């Protein structure tokens, strides 16, 4: 197959690119290297790599000719930076996604696989999460980031219903693992904590640390994306959670890491003020992923942390 991966030099995108190359697909990467949380960008020299902005229709449109599938990951992809620069966030995530969809429509792409976020659920559903967050719940966007990503979900559905372009949205729950960004105070927590403790710095817990997150390994996220590409069923704008159905508090993560590293917990943490716009609890219901994609997570978080020792 011939495929495009937008954001293909970043954390999730580069892992998808490597797997597609291993599967002998012809891969085109579009990435403008704008992400501020990466220590570096990851390019596979067997892919065709282009440093273009996803909003730049004139430059990216020719790349879509003959493409079978598009994995759309490029985005302004962090909650807190979106509060600092909402205009850039909305432009990149809303206009950029619309541009990708239009290019895909015009080139008769078979399917667009759109990467979205569990932050769409917000704080509304924290009281009773025994069954996890379901995809058909009303969204509760708290930041420009989550609004812009949900807008992309709606555009995907629109292009499926109005123009017949097959699309699917994957809502990721707190992805961690190989190549996770560790730069700056807004980096994902597992990679950040591991880096801080390896550098003999205190792990920085936001707020009381009792907020709970469903952490999903990058290997499982890549498998979900590949399953979407290989599915013979029309997905028609479906939204699918990609998580584990189990969550941990931030304090629990910090304690696991200190145990794995042979450190004392109390001596290796500090608490920082709570942030605006962040959910209190996330927990994925993954029944739809199992049903539609025959996908389920395989990587155990505790085992991962102790292997990193």
Image (spheres, grey):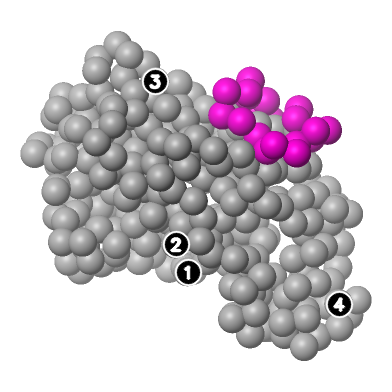
- Per the image, label 3 sits on a secondary structure element best described as helix
Gap in Å between the C-alphas at discs 1 and 4? 25 Å
Name which of mark 2 and mark 1 comes first in the sequence: 1
Q: With 212 as the anchor, is 7 left or right in this view? A: left
- Tell me the residue that label 1 is attached to: 178
| In the image, residue 5 lies in the stretch drawn in magenta | no
Q: With 146 as the anchor, is 205 left or right in this view? A: right
- Per the image, label 2 sits on a secondary structure element best described as helix
Q: Is residue 43 above or below residue 309?
A: above
- Tell me the residue that label 2 is attached to: 219
| In the image, residue 136 lies in the stretch drawn in magenta | yes
Name which of mark 1 and mark 4 comes first in the sequence: 1
Name which of mark 2 and mark 4 comes first in the sequence: 2
Name which of mark 3 and mark 4 comes first in the sequence: 3
Q: Position of residue 72 (x, y in %)?
A: 35, 41
Q: Residue at x 16, y 56 (%)?
A: 25
Q: Position of residue 112 (x, y in %)?
A: 30, 35
For marks 2 and 4, give the one nearer the viewer.
2
2 and 4 marks in contact (CB < 8 Å): no
- Tell me the residue that label 3 is attached to: 157
Label 2 packing within 10 angstroms: few (<14), some (14-19), many (20+): some
2 and 1 marks in contact (CB < 8 Å): yes
């Amino acid at each position: 197959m011939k495929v495009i991966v937008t954001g293909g030099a970043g954390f999730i995108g580069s892992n998808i690119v490597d797997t597609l190359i291993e599967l002998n697909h012809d891969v085109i990467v579009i990435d403008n290297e704008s992400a501020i949380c990466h220590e570096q960008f990851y390019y596979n020299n067997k892919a065709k790599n282009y440093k273009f902005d996803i909003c730049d229709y004139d430059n990216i449109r020719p790349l879509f000719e003959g493409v079978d599938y598009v994995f759309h990951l490029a985005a302004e992809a962090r909650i807190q930076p979106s509060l600092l620069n909402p205009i850039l966030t909305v432009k990149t995530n809303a206009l950029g996604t619309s541009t990708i969809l239009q290019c895909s429509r015009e080139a008769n792409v078979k399917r667009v696989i759109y990467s979205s976020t569990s932050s769409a659920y917000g704080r509304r559903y924290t009281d009773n999460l025994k069954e996890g967050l379901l995809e058909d719940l009303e969204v509760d966007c708290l930041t420009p980031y989550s609004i812009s990503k949900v807008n992309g979900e709606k555009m995907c559905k629109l292009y499926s219903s109005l123009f017949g372009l097959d699309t699917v949205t994957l809502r990721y729950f707190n992805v961690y693992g190989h190549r996770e960004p560790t730069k700056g105070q807004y980096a994902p927590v597992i990679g950040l904590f591991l880096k801080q403790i390896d550098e003999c710095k205190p792990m920085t817990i936001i707020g009381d640390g009792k907020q709970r997150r469903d952490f999903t390994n990058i290997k499982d996220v890549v498998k979900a994306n590949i399953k979407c590409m290989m599915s013979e069923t029309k997905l028609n704008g479906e939204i699918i959670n990609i998580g584990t159905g189990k969550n941990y508090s931030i304090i629990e993560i910090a304690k696991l890491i200190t145990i794995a590293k042979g450190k004392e917990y109390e001596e290796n943490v500090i608490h920082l003020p709570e942030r605006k716009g962040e959910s209190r609890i996330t927990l994925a219901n993954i029944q739809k992923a199992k049903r539609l994609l025959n996908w389920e997570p395989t990587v155990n978080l505790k085992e991962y942390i102790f292997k990193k020792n």
